[in-house]
Image: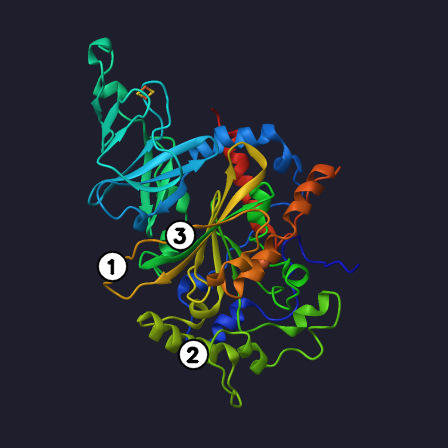
Amino acid sequence: MAESNSKPGEARAQGGTIAQILASDAKPAPAPLTAEAYEFLGDADLPASRYTCPDFFWQEMTVMWSRTWQWACREEHIPGVGDHYVYDIGPYSVIVTRVAQGQIKAFINSCTHRGTRLLGEEGPGFGQSFNCPFHGWSWHLDGALKDVPGRWDFPHVCEATHSLQEAACESWQGFIFVNLERDAPPLSEQLDVLPEHFGHFPLEGRRIRLHVQKVLPANWKAAQEAFMEAYHNFTTHDSPTGANTQYDIFGPHVSRFIHNIGHYFPESLSDYPGDKWREPPLTEQELLAGLPVTQRTLEDGETARSVGAQLLRDEMGAQLNVDFSGVSDSEMLDSIEYHLFPNAFFFPGTLISMAYRFRPIGDDVDSCLFEILMLEPLPEGATYPNPPEPVRLTVEQSYTEVDELAWLGAVYDQDTSNLQLQQEGLKATRKGITLGNYQEARIRRFHLTLDKYLQAPS
Ligand code: FES
Ligand SMILES: [Fe+2]
């Protein structure tokens, strides 16, 4: 097998780069998309037990999940005063509530008398106070203790000691984040470059068009890692694209890939088995046919990418009543995926516009909940419609059962089709997992940051 002479992490697939495509786009990409930030972070195997060992799972739960910022819901889930949203992570549960216009708070979902969970199922609800179903203690919207039945027996209980336990809570781009540590460092420290980058492509003005939740038969890390690289495109998706995907690591908590849509470099496929994609390579007309736009015959010199981006601007713009005239080709078309530690993905693109979240379920090391939020730009000044109820899929169900996912349903089925086998193989193996230096660098960055949490003094 041929090996490169370059230093570890320097080698790249053959053919052009994402940067070259962006530089030749008819409507140029904004500065964050032309930024490149890769660093080699080592090539040692990672222990498979990180995905399978209940002790490791509990360490993550008690030391990482209990101390990290995590996205709980969208602001559109709690538009009015008194609206709340219950968010569960492993054994922990948080109530996010709108205390006043412009003020959101988060409380541990547990009674300060004898611990009973105050609100049941995860999801949205409404109430002007919180009431415990066991002995009837109650709290005001701002968490202050309101009433204790049989007050005479509790001289040792007062507002200062028995108000609801607060968690830290902040909003960013319409996403509400919580941190179980009340005195956590500000969210901005964890967001790294995200505020700067998403200043160019705000998600605040997007609404949830579709919310899909599915249980996946794998550890939450293995599941999310299947979405952090495009190396699997050739085999899992049987697709000729992916080799020239750009991977960036912006800091301990934020990484990104940019994967071009409407273009690929045929020469990059020389590294991959089989000739089915190389001979002959896709034409510009065939690339245009892969885009969800009204098809027309391309003239000499026209590219699928520039024509496709313009057709999307016109057709999606008319459909959504949104002006996309200033939006770059890359933002219109590309799969641009930012990962925020520990478990969230944000896509600033227009065609590929979603957010993902991966979470453990209860205390199960072998399964997780994967959520897809399809986001859609709202016309300027429009009010948010009520967010849709999540569509819930069991492990056995196919994403193709969700009509609104359209062509993506089959893609998500492919993406999640290897997870059960991977989880089983991780238990059977006698070695660790091996990562590509470039294409899988985001996975390594994630694990290094996870280790930082796990090693922090308790
Ligand atoms: S446990 Fe909540 S009022 Fe007693
Ligand atoms: Fe994929």
Badge 2, how many Cα within 10 Å: few under 14, some, many 20+?
some
As displayed, is residue 340 above or below residue 259?
above
Mark 3 vs mark 2: in front: 2
User: Dividing the image into four equal quarters, which quarter contains ligand 1?
Assistant: top left
Mark found first going from the N terminus, 2 or 1: 2
Is 37 on the left-hand or right-hand side of 271? Answer: left
Badge 3, how many Cα within 10 Å: few under 14, some, many 20+?
many
Q: Which residue is mark 1?
A: 383
Visible residue check, residue 246: no
User: Closer to the camera, 419 or 132?
Assistant: 132
Q: Which residue is mark 2?
A: 311
Mark found first going from the N terminus, 1 or 3: 3
Mark 2 vs mark 1: in front: 1
Q: Secondary structure at mark 3?
A: helix
Counting from the top left corner in percent of width and height, residue 138 is at 24, 25
Q: Amino acid at mark 2?
A: Leu
| Residue appearing at x 42%, y 73% in the figure | 28
Q: Which residue is mark 3?
A: 194
As displayed, is residue 225 above or below residue 66?
below
Is 128 on the left-hand or right-hand side of 218? Answer: left
| Residue appearing at x 26%, y 22% in the figure | 137
Q: Amino acid at mark 3?
A: Leu
Q: Secondary structure at mark 1?
A: loop
User: Closer to the camera, 10 or 405?
Assistant: 405
Q: Amino acid at mark 1?
A: Thr
